[in-house]
Amino acid sequence: MCFFGLTHLGFGPLPVFIALIFFFEMFIVYTIAIVKHDVDPFMPYISSAADKRPQSCVFAIGGNISAFLISIMVFVRYRQMRSIFYQRDMGYPLCWNTIAKWFGYLSAIGLFVVANVQETAIIPVHMTAALVMFGGFTIYMIFQCYFTYITSPEITVYTVFIYRLTCTIMAGLCFVTSFVCGITASTIFHNRYPDLPTPRPWNGHIYQPGVEFHIISAVAEWCCAVFQLAFMVSFEPEFEKISLQYFLSSKFIERSDEENRDFFIDRNRYRV
């Protein structure tokens, strides 16, 4: 029998590990990008800071680990809610719980692609994955807010619902702001320079039309990531009570005397 989760803390440290990995890796990525003068120090996009080597390698390692841990977190939360709904004989949230699980998995897949396909490598793939990552997890947060509301105050206190609702609203606003302002910045730039590609990265030290909207978009992107991580950390008290276990059994079939005799005869036949 094997147990997953620490003995006394269960899966509680899991969301905290995800947040710590993000802040640690982004500190390294941002510092290297600034020292190498790869980006403007004032609020580049996360992907722009991690676009070039060696910071792209650090971002890929951290992103891959985080994507794996997020998928585990989504699965644990799914099983937790499923157990609660079964115990309470609540049939209708079970379908929503399954849908929420797949949005969480999509977000983890988006993070995996973003971490391994740099911004300037394959732009459509990277941008699509970023939308799936941030947008998918924002939708996942909405579902989890609903689950928190219908299970309060028996499972969690009502203040946890308020906290998660606040993080969800702020993450949603930041996601929309980042998306709209990013498109606006690109549109303004191409109206002035229709033959030039969108700056990657943007530079505030030279004249680039639309850079103001780019800064707003970049700030909103960082804030969206922070609010989503803050939401994940709120799972820590609930996950402390959860551990996962599975049973592994093995069956050994003894050879008959005739099979053993044939085995040794064949082995001696080919012995040099």
Image (cartoon, rainbow, N blue to C red):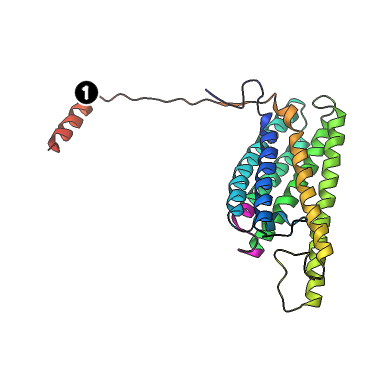
Horizontal relation, residue 68 to residue 77: left or right: left
Query: In the structure shown, which secondary structural element does the residue marked by tag 1 occupy?
Result: helix
Picture coordinates of residue 175 (x, y %)? 80, 53
Horizontal relation, residue 225 to residue 108: left or right: right
The answer to whether residue 254 of the structure is visible from this angle is yes
Residue for badge 1: 257
How many residues crowd around disc 1 within 10 Å: few (fewer than 14), some, or many (20 or more)?
few
The residue that appears at 58% across and 54% down in the rendered structure is 54
The residue that appears at 14% across and 38% down in the rendered structure is 270
Picture coordinates of residue 254 (x, y %)? 30, 23
- In magenta segment, residue 69: no
Q: Is residue 209 above or below residue 87?
A: below
Quarter containing the C terminus: top left
Q: Quadrant of residue 89?
A: top right
Picture coordinates of residue 16 (x, y %)? 70, 34
Residue situated furthest front in the rendering: 35
- Identity of the amino acid at label 1? Asp
Q: Is residue 136 above or below residue 215?
A: above
The answer to whether residue 86 of the structure is visible from this angle is no
Give the camera-side residue of 242 and 93.
242
Q: Is residue 189 above or below residue 139?
A: below
- In magenta segment, residue 114: yes
Q: Quadrant of residue 260?
A: top left
Picture coordinates of residue 240 (x, y %)? 70, 25
Magenta-highlighted residues: 113-123
The residue that appears at 25% across and 24% down in the rendered structure is 256
